[in-house]
Image (spheres, rainbow, N blue to C red):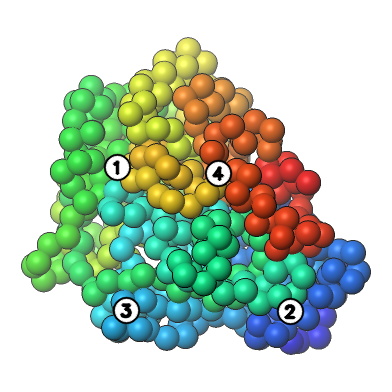
Amino acid sequence: MRSPSPATSWSNWSGLTSARPSEVLRPGSVEDVVAAVTRARELGSTVKMPGTGHSFTGIAAPEGIMLDPAGLSGLIEIDAANLTATAYAGTPLHLLNATLAAQGYSLHNMGDIAEQTIAGATSTGTHGTGGVVASLSAQIAGLELVTGTGEVVRADPTENPDVFAVARLGLGALGILTRITFRIEPLFVLEAHEFPMLWDEALERFEQMADENHHAELYWFPHTDRVLAKENNRVLDEAEPLGAFRGWLDDELLSNTLFGVVNRIGNARPSWIPRINNLSGQMLSARTYSDVPHKVFTSSRSVVFREMEYAVPREVGLEALREVRRWIDASGISISFPIEVRTTPADDIALSTSSGRASMYLAFHMNAQTDHTAYFAGVEEILRGYDGRPHWGKLNTRTAADLEPSYPRWSEFHAVRDRLDPDRVFSNTYLRRVLGS
């Protein structure tokens, strides 16, 4: 392990959370991680290994010793017979995706950003939409972590199954992940069909769309009836990706550069935002293309924003969205970012936002130059009334006391936490709020 670096400041991607760790270490092995955890425990301090900081909350904030994950990155092995791939926990998702694709494999499903490390993405519940499983955590077949007592624990459905049941989505509260094994599939081609709709038709058809397509989602432009729908399906044909110019035009110039300009205009003239959103919706056009999965699921994001996302039971999701729209219309708040609507099947992970129930996810964004607090607070109050569960890596104001009733397996998670981290070596301000002391 490299010698300690002088204390430096750390902040997450959105700029909302910062910390000044006492020292920074770069482990190159599991033994180095054990040494760092032992050191933190002896000092009565804490230790965290934040990834790229793409969580909007302080879930990974290193308030004591900080571990740089760069030395624990890369694919370790592919087990072709069992269709699994094992990688170091500090591996960025985009690197894992590209490496798997180069060898003829893919994950089943993924979210729309690939900058996170696999430890960070799984520990916060990063997810896509649809599929047999939607979250990255639910695709884990096994893992290795260093506990708060310095023990190296491996867990899968047969070895330490009680740890496996909770640690696939552990919020960084159970240990430092060092290796993760994913279930993988032979590489396939995913066809994307994107097309504009109007509000009434989109909500009337969405449940059918979600049932009849492998992956479906909606983007509603607030203050308008404009909606962008996306359907992704596996096909047997050869990939037909977007041409270089069309890809740059749609995904870089329009979705990032021009969108950033539009948000700056909206910041200066909030009263223009409804007209801007309506114009943006009118400019939507249909497009169809196909490619390897990670090039369809994920996209780049250069406009800095804040995000809150809630999972509600799928059967009440559209009702919740309608209530949110009524509140927005009455609130007087101008919102420039679309609201994203996705669905996930139920999974069996204790603190997953889809634990034990099929869910509909409603995601709310605000650009970084605009105060998001009133918008997010109003929406959060509505979604709590629908037994909503907040995404662990996105903004929320919840506490352990009011989160516990939403998770039937809450005590199961905490029993494992008490055993693996009795001294709370992995705690920080955010975790004390959402999990308790």
Task: Assign a secondary structure to mark 4.
Answer: loop
Residue where numbered disc 3 is placed: 82
Residue where numbered disc 4 is placed: 409
Question: Mark 3 is on which residue type?
Answer: Asn
Q: Residue at x 55, y 39 (%)?
A: 407
Question: Mark 2 is on which residue type?
Answer: Val
Q: Earlier in the sequence, mark 1 or mark 4?
A: 1
- Residue 422: quadrant of the picture: bottom right
Q: Earlier in the sequence, mark 4 or mark 2?
A: 2
Residue where numbered disc 2 is placed: 34
Residue mark closest to the camera, 4 vs 3: 4
Q: Nearer the viewer, residue 114 or 234?
A: 234
In three-dimensional space, the C-alpha distance between marks 2 and 3, rounded to whole angstroms, equals 30 Å
Tag of residue 217: 1
Q: Nearer the viewer, residue 162 or 28?
A: 162
Dot 4, how many residues are within 10 Å of its Cα: few (below 14), some (14-19), or many (20+)? some
- Residue 202: quadrant of the picture: top left
Number of numbered discs: 4
Q: Are marks 1 and 3 in contact (CB under 8 Å)?
A: no
Q: Is residue 99 above or below residue 233?
A: below
Task: Assign a secondary structure to mark 1.
Answer: strand
Question: x, y (%) of residue 185?
Answer: 27, 71
Residue mark closest to the camera, 2 vs 1: 2
Residue mark closest to the camera, 4 vs 2: 4
Judge from the rendering whether residue 326 lies leftward or rightward of residue 71; answer left or right: left
